[in-house]
Image (cartoon, rainbow, N blue to C red):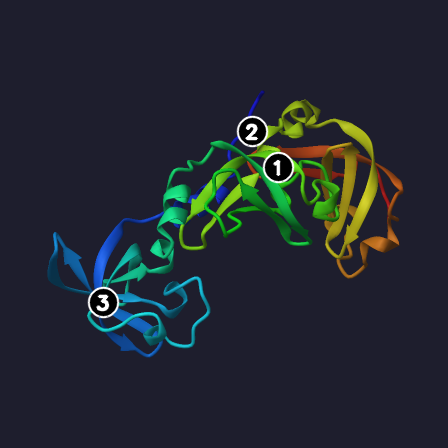
């Protein structure tokens, strides 16, 4: 199967969410809703003070970190970066469930996993990934990662109880989830469509938005025609020029594989004003 170029935005997201090193720290105080800790190396307390922000303290809802930690308590926490003049920030929630952390760390981007769809919502799909520890539902598929085809709701792609195979985008220890992609296991339809660049095609208007219209050029290929291609008067809405489900003749001006984007223009000489 041919593969498209990875989306640079997903690459950047994966790099930002990549798990950091787990450290042993001792709770030394509280600063508002944050927890102050001192790093422990080789069993010895160091001079460096780190900070666990409130939202990184636990996956459970708590009013104050003192409900979770005691002064002098040693815990494990994951490094997440340095802020406030170089102060180390850490996440205790990333190490809260050792079995979950171990499961997530064993998953690599590009790895194919199997699982069962647990729930389908308008914002995405939750998946019980095979091998995950009892309790948490670790898999999540965003709507854009479900299908190459245009869908209006995730239920058009999967249903609860369905067995699926998906590709790992990133396993994120701080959220306790692994982002998955169904469409990554299928060929990007734009790969075969790329030879249509510059050609004049007839498609169907599927959606009208304030700044232009989406045009279906093939069952799984959608292009975008900007409002500026329809009129030189930006204050006039696209509905004045086209209707949904109306055939329209367009020219393919760009096929962007990394961003899975097709840009369109009206053929030379066309005038819809």
Q: Height in image: 156 above or below 175?
A: above
**Viewer-nearest residue: 21 or 252:** 21
Residue 177 in the image, given as x and y percentages of width and height: 48, 49
Residue 210: percent from the left, percent from the top? 75, 57
Residue 119 x, y percent position in the rendering: 65, 50
Label 2 neighbour load within 10 Å: few <14, some 14-19, many 20+ = some
For the N terminus, the image quarter is top right
The CA span between labels 2 and 1 is: 9 Å
Identify the residue under disc 1.
260
Q: Which residue is mark 3?
A: 73
How many marks can you see? Answer: 3
Q: Give 273 or 133, whichever is nearer the viewer.
A: 133
Q: Are marks 2 and 1 in contact (CB under 8 Å)?
A: yes
Name the side, left or right, on which 32 lies relative to 108.
left
Gap between marks 3 and 1 measured at Cα: 50 Å
Residue drawn at (85%, 43%), measured in percent from left and top?
271
Left or right, 156 with respect to 180, comes to right
User: Residue 231, how many percent across, how many down?
Assistant: 79, 51
Q: Check the image and report above or below for 189 versus 212.
A: above
SS at badge 3: loop
Name the image quarter holding residue 175: bottom left
Mark 1 nearby-residue class (10 Å; few <14, some 14–19, many ≥20): some
In contact (CB < 8 Å): disc 3 and disc 1 = no
Residue picked out by circle 2: 4
Residue 72 visible (yes or no) = yes
Q: Of callouts 3 and 1, which one flags the residue occurring earlier in the amino acid sequence?
A: 3
Helix, strand or loop at mark 2 = loop
Q: Which disc number belongs to residue 152?
A: none
Q: Secondary structure at mark 1?
A: loop
Instruction: Please give left or right for residue 205 compared with residue 21 in the image.
Output: right
């Amino acid at each position: 199967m041919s593969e498209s170029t990875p989306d640079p935005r997903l690459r950047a997201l994966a790099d930002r969410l990549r798990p950091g090193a787990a450290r042993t720290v001792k709770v030394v105080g509280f600063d508002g809703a944050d927890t102050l800790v001192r790093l422990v190396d080789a069993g010895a307390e160091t001079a460096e003070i780190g900070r666990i922000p409130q939202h990184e303290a636990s996956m459970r809802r708590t009013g104050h970190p003192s409900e979770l930690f005691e002064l002098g308590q040693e815990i494990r926490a994951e490094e997440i970066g340095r802020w406030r003049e170089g102060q180390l920030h850490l996440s205790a929630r990333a190490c809260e469930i050792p079995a979950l952390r171990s499961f997530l760390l064993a998953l690599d981007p590009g790895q194919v996993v199997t699982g069962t769809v647990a729930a389908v919502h308008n914002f995405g799909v939750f998946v019980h990934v095979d091998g995950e520890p009892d309790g948490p539902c670790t898999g999540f598929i965003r709507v854009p990662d479900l299908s190459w085809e245009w869908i209006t709701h995730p239920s058009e792609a999967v249903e609860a109880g369905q067995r699926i195979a998906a590709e790992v985008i990133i396993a994120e220890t701080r959220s306790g989830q692994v982002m998955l992609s169904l469409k990554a296991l299928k060929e990007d339809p734009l790969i075969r469509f790329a030879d249509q660049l510059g050609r004049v095609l007839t498609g169907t208007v599927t959606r009208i938005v304030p700044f232009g219209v989406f045009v279906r050029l093939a069952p799984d290929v959608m292009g975008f025609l900007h409002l500026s291609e329809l009129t030189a008067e930006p204050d006039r809405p696209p509905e004045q020029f086209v209707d949904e489900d109306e055939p329209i003749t367009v020219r393919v001006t760009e096929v962007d594989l990394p961003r899975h984007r097709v840009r369109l223009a009206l053929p030379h000489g066309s005038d819809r004003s």
